[in-house]
Amino acid sequence: MTTMLTRVKGYRPRRRHLPILATMAMLIGAYVYGASSYPAFGSGQVVLDLFINNAFLLVVAVGMTFVILTGGIDLSVGSVVALSTVVSADLLQNQSWPVYAVIPAVLVIGAVLGFGMGVLVHVFEIQPFIATLIGMFFARGLCYTISTQAYSIDNPTVANLAQTQLPLGPELHISIGVVVALVVVAIAAYVLYGTRFGRTVYAIGGNPKSALLMGLNVGRTRIAVYTLSGFCSALGGLLLVLYKSSGDPLNGVGLELTAIAAVVIGGTLLTGGSGYVLGTVLGIMVLGIIQTLITFDGTLNSWWTSIITGALLFAFIVLQRLAGRRAT
Amino acid sequence: MKVLTAHRLFWPVVALLVLLLGDLIAQPSFFALELRDGHLYGNLIDILKNGAPLILIAIGMTLVVATRGIDLSVGAVVAISGALACLHISGLGDQNSLGGTLAAVGMALGLAVALGAWNGWLVAVLGIQPIIATLILMVAGRGIAQLITGGQIITINSHPYEWIGSGFTFGLPSAILLALAVFAIAAVLVRRSALGLLVESVGGNPEAGRLAGLRSARLSWLTYVFCALCAGIAGLMISANVHSADGNNAGQFIELDAILAIVIGGTQLTGGRFSLTGSVIGALLIQTLTTTVYALGIAPQAIMLFKALVVLVVCLLQSPVFRRKFGRRRKTPPPSPIVAPEKVEAGV
Amino acid sequence: MLRMSHIRKEFPGVVALDDVSFRMFPGEVHALMGENGAGKSTLIKVLTGVYGVDAGTIELAGNPVAFSGPGEAQRSGVSTVYQEVNLCPNLSVAENICLGKEPRRRGRIDWRGMRRRAAALLARLDVEVDVSAELGSCSIAVQQLVAIARALDVDARVLILDEPTSSLDTGEVEQLLNVVRSLREQGMAILFVSHFIEQVFAVADRMTVLRNGKLIGEYRTEEISPVDLVTRMIGKELAVLEDLEDAGHSRSEVAGAPVFLEADGVGRKGGVAPFSLDIREGEVIGLAGLLGSGRTELARLLFGADHADSGSVRINGEPVSLKTPRSGLDRRIAFCSENRKTEGLVEELTVRENIVLALQASRGWARPISRRRQDEIAERYIKALDIRPANAEAKVGDLSGGNQQKVLLARWLITEPRLLILDEPTRGIDIGAKTEIQRLVTRLSGEGMAVVFISAELEEVLRLSHRVAVLRDRTVVAVLDNESLTAERVMATMAEGVGR
Amino acid sequence: GGGGGGTGEGGAITLGFAQVGAESGWRTANTKSIQDSAKAAGVELKFSDAQQKQENQITAIRSYIQQKVKVIAFSPVVESGWDTVLKEAKTANIPVILTDRAVDSQDKTLYKTFLGSDFVAEGKKAGEWLAKEFGSAAGDVNIVELQGTTGSAPANDRKKGFADVIASNPKFKVVASQTGEFTRAKGKEVMEAFLKSQPKIDVLYAHNDDMALGAIEAIQAAGKVPGKDIKIVSVDGVRDALQALADGKINHVVECNPLLGPQLMDLVKKVAAGEQVPPRIETAETEFDQAAARAALPQRQY
Ligand SMILES: Nc1ncnc2c1ncn2[C@@H]1O[C@H](COP(=O)(O)OP(=O)(O)OP(=O)(O)O)[C@@H](O)[C@H]1O
Ligand SMILES: Nc1ncnc2c1ncn2[C@@H]1O[C@H](COP(=O)(O)OP(=O)(O)OP(=O)(O)O)[C@@H](O)[C@H]1O
Ligand SMILES: [Mg+2]
Ligand SMILES: [Mg+2]
């Protein structure tokens, strides 16, 4: 007996791409608005500065994207960033370690912290929010025990790297941090799209119980994702070291929220299972462009700055939402 | 005994007691209570008084969390409500006038409710993810609070207003009495009516709730309003406690503490089952932790590490997996955590 | 091939398996039989390492094993389709089939190859869907088929199918059984769980019967008759099917009754094409159609779960707008969804809470149902539908699949609706309970309740309905009077759309 | 929105100012002073608020460079980590003025001048007052300290300056020191705990006025008299503190002057005109005792 299962393969709009498209359109809109209001805004360097200023955040947010895609959250990123800068500063300045030894050391510390949180989440079934909050307290506490003061790094290699400008054209340049960040984004996008690990991340976000029954290695992937986020935070910390040539235990206070906001504005669902790294890049651009617009305006006092930031955030999010709705 | 340890509030309560015991050992006079100016005075009273705002916010946020939401804007609402009330009172001819103070309180709470309605609208009507929806107010709200205070700290001198934050009634801090009153009202409202069940269903499986005919949007909207109202009251308390409104610092990072309290109290951030009593215990635990830090004289640099350690221990104790792995003393594997939470909760 | 000896598994308060032994041979289909809650799914989960055992041993091909989880079981050649659809709704059909064993090229997932392989596997089951569509947008039946296709993908030695046919139509079932037979030819050991006795007899070589977590016995198919089997499953004689068998309803029986609901040109773009239908009080309308023909979509429109973008609905002659489930509930329409897991139950809540949910929703939050009433209602329906364990405070998520289905049904029955829409209400329910439900439907319609009844089992539809609406390609192609209606006739209509 | 960058057509100087944030009344007064005096001096001000984040300040400075402002001024959130962006400013030929806090850069050519106060000196002044006040006291002097936000420069420096001075006399003992995060609420909460854990407190040293004001309430609630039973010294000199000083609840306030605006505008004009300026200018700061507080109160704006 045959069944007649002819289903029309008509055009089904790629609903999951809509938020990203909408965000992109709004970014362009914001840029055009900025360029028409403030002449200096139109120079390409303003866009490149967005990347230069946010390179470290981008790396952190990429790690966060992985975690959020599994339906988790990582609150420790800000503290781990701070810890990385403090450890780098301490090792370079006080212990006189060479740069090429400091980099792996810091990355390992970040990854180990992430791994620990992953174990808490997966093995002991502690809610991600709390497990990483513990990590947040812990890393920040370590910062303070190393130093309560910010200090400069005057290592010549670091200074060199920090001040290298890679020219992209007349009066246009980017920093080494941007290159690193873009490489991280590219790798992350590839991993999420093209590897088994990446797809498992999505599966866990979709339904962790099912993922387990489907025979996927949920435990390893979960722990790996937090380890990855710890690693990315440490890398972000290193980029911040390059950016500021200093270590500061107060670095990255509230950074976790900025990173989460960027990821979510980029269209990733906080419940997991849906989203793209590219969206995260756009999310960061949105936050960055809001800040840049306000700086260019330069007439707002402190509280109006907060209020207008909130209002612009609102405008972006609602427009994105409505665009997504309209088209479905 | 087994029933007792299986209760989901058992471990948080144990942690709270252990912490208090530690205080007692470190500082034998820790539990000392004396009567001063007709009211009780001592560390325990401080814990209750200073913990009251957190308790309130944790109660409000518990319901939001139960519907799978989160409210990051409570800190901003705290600042705004305190600022508005103090602004109004500072403009009064007679700051001690009861009517003027009541008007100020009414205005502040009214604004708080409006802010909650705004959050709820973004989440329930526009369907924006809660964390982002409330982030908007978290960012803008600080600005609004500072706009109200003009960036300065508004100092006031109003006895009726102070009562909210640092006054005493029946020898006990009025703040804790207020918080307990809100808790009692919320608990009765939630467990004596069907609200609790409906909220838990909406949080447990939103689509199922919708198909069962629940007005889930309205319900989650309401939870945001309630949460903001609680935050508003907390804002009054915090500002009344120091007779001043600080638009920038009041309620900073209180959202994190509240969420921590809720989770310690046994409510899952993924929504569904919730426990108001648990959240209250969680909040008390956090406040006790803060007071302990001061009582033990822990150096400021070490506070974070100490907090990390305590929270870690509490969470591990609560984790059935951890107890199963490391608590080999009991012969049968411990049962899954929730046995009959209903009875306890319904009893409040 | 596989031997499980003296297995014991205890959950808090319930002994799910008690000294159960079980074996499987290569090249044989082994059916695991038992009522709802007998312990079938638990046995399977114990076998594949989802749960640890409290006592007993498991041997695979002579070697003792203790899988740490489904992943390890899969790698050791035990491929499983669990009872509830356990897939990721956010991923595409192709991914769901290939997840964890994606074809790769130079370390990178070969997406095209993956889609091809998925399509090929589905074709084996005679399913044709767009494999790059999101799984969540597919009907539960398609999801079930996807889960089966996924299990076929491994070169497994043991294939376990836990109620694979619960929401499939005759056609798909036939196809699936063919696939099972061909796998048997290849020497695979297959464990098959189903509540459909005919299917079991059609395919199984050997059966094991469980009752209340205890082993009743192992039989070769030739040795046992269906009646014997049922008797062993439920522990007593069952002589109920007969009195319903040829009830043979017809439109004329309800001709005099007032029309309850009248749908005129109701439809939804991308859902069902506009249709018109009137339902009289006391009438049972069956919906028949093939997989994905739009029965569920039609039912959802009648309830207001989705809102229609054309047409109008009148209830008792008055025009009404059904835009939300709430509006349906307010008009005393009840809709028991086919997908109990995602659209039905709140797993964390108790049986009692799940049962009273819809009733409570319709009363509003301010008028709580007193705890005593709740207990009473729960008690009554636990008894009426034989929900096990008979504990109103058990978490619904811990119940066996069939018992969950009964809870969902109970939720809607207590709202005392005037129109009851049942979408696959008998999914995964054992014969005893199924008969009970059928009898209930007959009784309720006798009392004047209008019923829309959807079931993949055509016989069941014919047995209960006064009229049968046939859908094809999301269009109502015919509404047939049940008088002297035969399954063949309906099937012909489903296939070709021959008029009335 | 305002027009482009650079020197305005009418010859007005554009000043890009990157403020730390608005974390306290002190800071707000600082901002207001700068905004008001910019207006008065005819300087076009591009203001930005970094919300206590160095990254934001760097971002703002970069955007000022893009906008080609004439002069850049900023109050560094922290002292370290400015070399890269300051080099960019230097390359773009934009002079930089630091206000309020210095940076610890080795290369002193990266900025033209520093205008502000010295936190260490403030701590010292508080210590000196204490040494004078209790110099003749018999027995130990038990001090409790309310620190600012852990890790912040004012907290670190005010603690250090104070500690340096009192170290010379062994009878001064800091019996408890805890962070009050620069806020009244925390100041009160911590003081409440101190009052219970410390049997005898003679002096309270608070890193800012707000914490002292909070602590006063705790002291009163404990049935003690602030200013008498426990002497109080704090830093900043905001209006409420001077009032408390006048009322005798605080004993001494070291001023940290936020009203840098007029001085800054002078410097901006000079720097813009290419004039030479001294590398370091300390703001005029006093200390207040009760009489000075009474005198200063009527004019206090913040
Ligand atoms: N996780 C669990 N926690 C507690 N009890 C459970 C759990 N899983 C199953 N049970 C209980 O174990 C018993 C056996 O359930 P099981 O799912 O194996 O039944 P089944 O034979 O598959 O029934 P059905 O035909 O309805 O699917 C039931 O009484 C059920 O309530
Ligand atoms: N061309 C198609 N592409 C993708 N999905 C389709 C297509 N046609 C139908 N569907 C899916 O099939 C379902 C429509 O049928 P519906 O669920 O109403 O079928 P049904 O008759 O109840 O069949 P069953 O429940 O047995 O699958 C919808 O979930 C719809 O998303
Ligand atoms: Mg089962
Ligand atoms: Mg269907």
Image (cartoon, coloured by chain):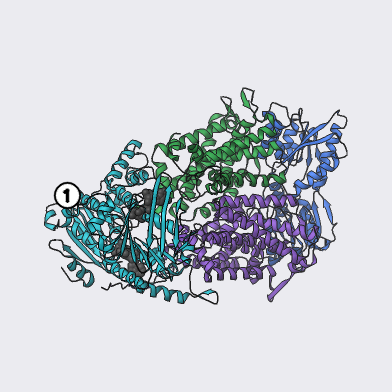
Front position in the image: D226 or A295: D226
Front position in the image: D25 or C142: C142
- Ligand 2 position by quadrant: bottom left
Check disc 1: other Cα within 10 Å, few if <14, some if 14-19, many if 20+: some
**Which of the 4 image quarters holds residue A68?**
bottom right
Residue C443 x/y as whole percent = 19, 49
Front position in the image: D129 or C122: C122
Residue at (46, 50) in percent of width and height? C54
Q: Which residue lies most toward the front here?
A: C62
Q: Which residue is denoted by mark 1 in the rendering?
A: C446
Front position in the image: B163 or B177: B177
Q: Which chain is cyan?
A: C
What color is chain D drawn in? Answer: blue
What amino acid type should be assigned to the residue bearing mark 1?
A: Gly
Residue D2 x/y as whole percent = 63, 61
> Where C79 falls versus B228 (above or below)?
below
